[in-house]
Amino acid sequence: MAGEPVRVKSVDEVVRDLPPDLKQEVEDFIHFLISRRRRTPGRGFRLSWKGALKALAAQYTSVELQHEITRSWAK
């Protein structure tokens, strides 16, 4: 007994032993994992914020704004 290898059940065997309601949960979870992996083509960047900082143009250069944003993220 001490020298016998431990047998690990395969996923198929474990699922086969489950009651029907849990088998359905496993199937649903598998579909969820598959859908999460699928890559859908993106729509590209949304620029809905474009022009939002126009009022600050006279006060800051674009580089200065980048530095301000970086500093605010660090807080």
Image (cartoon, rainbow, N blue to C red):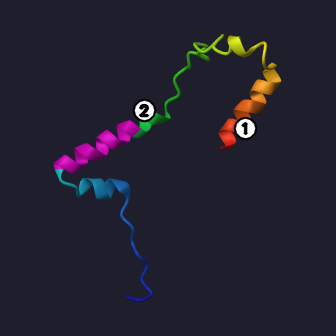
Q: Residue at x 66, y 10 (%)?
A: 51
Q: Which residues are magenta?
A: 20-32
Query: Which-is-in-front pick, marks 2 and 1?
Result: 1
51 and 3: which is toward the camera: 51
With respect to residue 45, does 11 lie above or below?
A: below
In the figure, is residue 60 to the left or right of 21?
right
With respect to residue 7, does 54 lie above or below?
A: above
Distance from disc 2 to disc 1, alpha carbons, whole Å, reads 37 Å
Check if residue 10 falls in the magenta segment: no
- The secondary structure making up most of the magenta span is helix
Q: Quadrant of the C terminus?
A: top right
Q: Amino acid at mark 1?
A: Arg
Q: Residue at x 30, y 46 (%)?
A: 26
Check if residue 31 falls in the magenta segment: yes
Q: Residue at x 56, y 19 (%)?
A: 42
Q: Which mark is residue 15?
A: none
Location of residue 9 in the rendering, given as x and y in whole percent from the top left corner? 36, 64
Asked whether the residues under the numbered discs 2 and 1 touch, taking CB atoms below 8 Å apart as contact, a structural biologist would say: no
Determine the image quadrant of residue 62. Answer: top right
Determine the image quadrant of residue 71. Answer: top right
Q: Amino acid at mark 2?
A: Ser
Location of residue 38 in the rendering, given as x and y in whole percent from the top left corner? 49, 30
In the figure, is residue 29 to the left or right of 51?
left
Q: Residue at x 55, y 20 (%)?
A: 41
Q: Which mark is residue 71?
A: 1
4 and 71: which is toward the camera: 71
Q: Quadrant of the N terminus?
A: bottom left
Residue that protrudes farthest toward the front in the picture: 59
With respect to residue 58, does 8 lie above or below?
A: below
Q: Which mark is residue 35?
A: 2
